[in-house]
């Protein structure tokens, strides 16, 4: 590749980006690059409803980024290379973010580091990338850069995929016996943590052979037996399209362990959603949903959703309720798949190509992560919640700055244990694993504890659940062990822009709040609704404050209705919607109105993520309720 087009530097200064879009070619190699350019910024949730091809998505690449990028600005500007800062590709697993780059004419991405899912999607989709600044120097000096040589610098599995022409051709070659695993099948035994044990136990050895490797180590890239696999309306159409183009009508492997979820679009037509949103999103969203329904019927896949054969709800909540099991490897085409890690499961999000591969082969690629062990002790006092804990953790410089990273392809997870976990239930603990991805982590896994066993016995019935749990070896290795005393964790919020922008609630008492959202896979469980209702009961919403409540599943809604919590919300005039995922991504009630500041129990507060401009603060359910009463960010204890 030789630089024939232009280089777009995604700097922290909007004015510098605007100058580049205006036609000025500026050498900004020494300027601060934008941290964590996220996939919502690359391609918005609204644009994602339009389709999944480069032709459709290219004009929407980076639209509204820094409020200066217009529609088709990148493609029409003749940009060939994009340059970002650390943690490029944070956020969603949406592979359409890569497609949008390609559709906008981008041939190479250069950044200080890449987030795991986005990096995998680039490898699997064939978009070249580099974390080496010398590559940019060479291009700007007029030299030619061998893009195939960049692929040769990747780890063995990624190289094999690149040489095969992509992940799907690689998968077919693997099934045909023309491709062998790119890793050692007989590594020496070594002490392992719980994460490594699950990966090793599910390691692929070859067609017709039993699964299992003696050990794995950080940095290894292996294929694992895929347990449950799932998709929703945003992604299923692209997955099926990729599958059919590569594999035709060949049946899916183990379809009983696959489900599709109609959850991301089901609330777009809610009466409180602005007409401006419905007019842009509803019709194309319905087309994508229809594609998924047709695919389920054609391929014999389970389907969850309103009026469907299986219950409605947010996919991650339903996976915890019905599908995830300890010691298995689980994936969905959604970045918040780590939610299921609460059940001692190795669960993570993947892109559309990886899911098509998993459907055909029954395997999923895994880069063995570095593991940080979090040991939780102390008494939460009935006040500090898992939301406070995870915001406190991912805002720590060790995670926020990815100090665990040594190379561009490193991944990291947290393995959470300790006696402090026993004071919370699975609803509450799932917030910790759900939000690991917000800290740049691959996933999180909860070590065996009594709340997991209690949940599984109550939800799934009697079973040998304790024996299925995966325990770490006593002498296992970790990248770091962090001990957290809950007595030292403050009530914590995330300030607008990124979930890692942590602040003690006590420093934010002057922040006015107008819109309160209690919803999503992170904040719409029974425990979440209960915590908010108990604070709200006996109070009224402050003048000018509105509240939206969305239970995360049908069973959650039924339990909250039975125990009177939904009546508490009704009494103050809150909007209570059917179960769904809409508010988090601007597809349902709770979308910020002009001039509003939002306090939300969701997991992600990127600019415009919730469907409109306006600052979004991430808070716990109790803080959300207290803030709704006072009209500003409020400690629940202030209401006593």
Image (cartoon, helix red, strand yellow):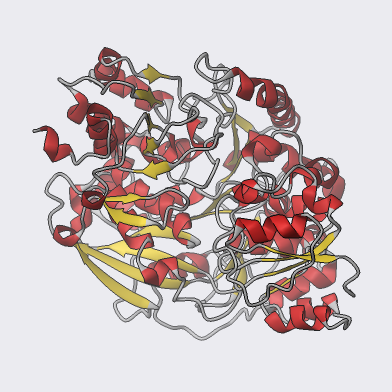
Residue 272 position, x and y percent, is 49, 17
Q: Quadrant of the N terminus?
A: bottom right
Q: How many marks?
A: 0
Where 278 sits versus 433, above or below? above
Q: Quadrant of the C terminus?
A: top left
Residue 214 position, x and y percent, is 51, 77
Q: Nearer the viewer, residue 370 or 529?
A: 529
| In the displayed structure image, the side of residue 498 where residue 471 appears, left or right | left
**What residue lies at 37% left-to-right and 61% top-to-bottom?**
395
Residue 228 position, x and y percent, is 55, 47
Residue 113 position, x and y percent, is 59, 71
**What residue lies at 66% left-to-right and 22% top-to-bottom?**
282
Q: Nearer the viewer, residue 437 or 535?
A: 535
Query: Quadrant location of residue 444?
Result: bottom left
| Residue 464 visible in image | no
| In the displayed structure image, the side of residue 561 where residue 187 appears, left or right | right
**What residue lies at 33% left-to-right and 44% top-to-bottom?**
463
Where 68 sits versus 131, above or below? above
| Residue 613 visible in image | yes
């Amino acid at each position: 590749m030789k630089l024939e087009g232009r280089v777009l530097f995604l700097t922290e200064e909007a004015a510098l980006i605007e100058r580049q879009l205006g036609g000025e070619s500026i050498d900004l190699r020494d300027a601060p690059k934008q941290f964590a350019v996220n996939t919502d910024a690359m391609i918005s949730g609204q644009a994602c409803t339009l389709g999944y091809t480069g032709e459709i998505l290219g004009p929407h690449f980076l639209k509204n980024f820094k409020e200066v990028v217009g529609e088709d600005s990148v493609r029409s500007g003749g940009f060939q290379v994009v340059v970002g800062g650390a943690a490029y590709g944070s956020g969603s697993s949406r592979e359409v973010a890569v497609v949008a780059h390609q559709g906008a004419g981008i041939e190479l991405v250069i950044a200080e580091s890449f987030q795991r899912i986005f990096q995998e999607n680039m490898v699997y989709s064939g978009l070249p990338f580099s974390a080496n600044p010398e590559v940019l120097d060479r291009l700007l000096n007029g030299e030619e850069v061998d893009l195939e040589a960049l692929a040769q610098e990747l780890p063995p599995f990624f190289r094999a995929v690149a040489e095969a022409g992509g992940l799907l051709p690689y998968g077919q070659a693997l099934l045909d016996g023309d491709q062998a695993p790119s890793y050692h099948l007989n590594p020496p035994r070594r002490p392992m943590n719980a994460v490594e044990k699950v990966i090793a136990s599910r390691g692929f050895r070859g067609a017709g052979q039993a699964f299992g490797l003696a050990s794995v180590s950080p940095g290894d890239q292996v294929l694992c037996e895929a347990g449950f696999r799932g998709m929703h309306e945003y992604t299923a159409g692209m997955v099926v399209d990729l599958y059919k183009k590569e594999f035709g009508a060949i049946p899916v492997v183990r379809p009983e362990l696959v489900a599709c979820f109609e959850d991301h679009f089901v609330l777009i037509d809610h009466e409180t959603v602005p007409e401006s949103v419905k007019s842009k999103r509803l019709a194309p969203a319905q087309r994508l949903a229809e594609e998924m329904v047709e695919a389920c019927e054609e391929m014999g896949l389970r389907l969850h959703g309103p009026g469907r054969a299986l219950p409605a709800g947010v996919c991650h909540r339903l996976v915890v309720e019905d599908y995830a099991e300890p010691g298995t490897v689980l994936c969905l085409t959604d970045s918040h798949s780590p939610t299921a890690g609460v059940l001692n499961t190795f669960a993570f999000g993947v892109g559309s190509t990886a899911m098509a591969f998993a459907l055909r082969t029954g395997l999923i690629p895994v880069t063995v992560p570095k593991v940080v062990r979090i040991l939780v002790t102390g008494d939460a006092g009935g006040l500090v919640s898992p939301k406070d804990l995870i915001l406190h953790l991912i805002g720590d410089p060790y995670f926020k700055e990815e100090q665990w990273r040594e190379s561009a392809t490193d991944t990291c997870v947290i393995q959470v244990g300790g006696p402090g976990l026993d004071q919370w239930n699975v609803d509450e603990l799932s917030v910790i694993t759900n939000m690991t991805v917000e800290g740049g982590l691959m996933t999180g896994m909860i070590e065996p504890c009594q709340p997991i066993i209690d949940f599984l016995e109550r939800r799934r019935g009697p079973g040998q659940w304790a024996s299925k749990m995966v325990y770490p070896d006593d002498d296992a290795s970790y990248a770091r062990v962090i001990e957290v005393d809950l007595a030292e964790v403050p009530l914590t919020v995330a300030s607008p822009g990124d979930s890692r922008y942590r602040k003690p609630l006590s420093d934010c008492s002057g922040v006015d709040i107008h819109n309160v959202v209690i919803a999503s896979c992170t904040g719409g469980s029974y425990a979440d609704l209960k915590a908010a209702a108990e604070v709200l009961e006996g109070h009224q919403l402050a003048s000018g404050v509105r509240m939206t409540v969305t239970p995360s599943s049908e069973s959650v809604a039924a339990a909250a209705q039975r125990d009177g919590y939904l009546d508490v919300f009704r009494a103050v005039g809150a909007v209570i919607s059917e179960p769904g995922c809409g508010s988090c991504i601007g597809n349902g009630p709770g979308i910020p109105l002009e001039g509003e500041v939002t306090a939300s129990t969701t997991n992600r507060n990127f600019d415009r993520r919730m469907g409109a401009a306006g600052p979004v603060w991430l808070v716990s359910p109790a803080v959300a309720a207290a803030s709704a009463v006072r009209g500003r960010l409020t400690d629940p204890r202030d209401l006593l």
